[in-house]
Amino acid sequence: MRNQLKTPFILLFCCFCGWALSSCKKLTEEPARTTSGSVITNFATNQSIVLGTGSNGSTLYAVNTCSHGSRADTTAFASLTDSTKAYLAATYPGYTFKKAYKILNPSGTIDGYVVFIIYNGNPVALRFNPAGIFRTVLEQREAHDLDGPGWHEGGIFGDRDGRHRDTIALTALPTTVLIYMTTNYPTDTLKHAMINRDSSYVVISADNGVFATGFSKTGTFMQRVQIYPHVVSVSTLTQATLPASVSSYLSATYPAYVFDNGFELKFNGTAAGYLIVIDANSTKYLVLFNSSGAFVRVRAIR
């Protein structure tokens, strides 16, 4: 195994409980706390939806869910389009559906949908257009961060300061992880490694394709996902050197995302695309673009 791993990639785990919807009006009060798994119906927001309570006890919101004057009505999972259901299944395998809402503009016309799911223990809020096509992962904030930059040092989303606290050196991986990779994938070249808040790990590597391999905090193998199917050469990119189209797509689709690492992929010596590892609201994503910087597909890992 060529031990060339360059930066980390596994996700930050948080436990959340309680779910609720909020209207698209100014926040006027703190929502009531609930027991685990319940749904609250007494709420208030600032274009925000109450997701629940974070591990530090703060109330968690999804923000910019709709425009002023719009309203959100509950809708059943069965009412969602096939394209929405297919997107959720492909991007968040094994997710748990929580709630869905249709967003109605002042004239009563459907302006889109907001869907809430749980993925690997984390709440994810997604916005879809009126036809049910994915548009954006909604930014999440703690209650006292609704105004301002949307995060504070030491908070759930403190990694938005860009210090990459979840990145670790390849040599810092547990011996059990390194032995597993050497034994089972001896020709993999390690490219990147990350550690979650629950001390689990993700390793990005390349061989006959590009892969993400996940391990528990004890170094036990959890899953391996192929990100790119061809033999490629992989070189590291910084956030500043990303193509403009890639940066624009990430900013529009994953507001307040945190850049973890980027890779330029070459197939038979020719530019094949870009693989970007980001964190959005404590969920890790692998986002693939073609050689022109156009979006190809995305996969949530943890």
Image: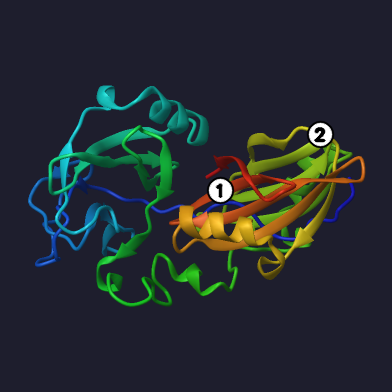
According to the picture, the residue beneath numbered tag 1 turns out to be 285
The image shows residue 93 at horizontal and vertical percentages of 49, 31
Distance of mark 1 from mark 2, alpha carbons?
Answer: 20 Å
Q: Which element carries disc 2, helix, strand or loop?
A: loop
The image shows residue 136 at horizontal and vertical percentages of 42, 49
Count of numbered labels shown in the rendering = 2
> Vertically, is 78 above or below 241?
above
At 66% from the left and 66% from the top, the residue drawn is 239
The image shows residue 114 at horizontal and vertical percentages of 29, 42
Q: Which element carries disc 1, helix, strand or loop?
A: strand
Q: Earlier in the sequence, mark 1 or mark 2?
A: 2
At 78% from the left and 48% from the top, the residue drawn is 178
> Vertically, is 175 above or below 73?
below
Mark 2 surroundings: few (<14), some (14-19) or many (≥20) residues within 10 A: some
According to the picture, the residue beneath numbered tag 2 turns out to be 230
> Vertically, is 81 above or below 174?
above
| Visual colour scheme | rainbow
Identify the image quadrant of the N terminus: top right
In the image, what residue type sits under mark 1?
Tyr
In the image, what residue type sits under mark 2?
His
At 37% from the left and 53% from the top, the residue drawn is 138
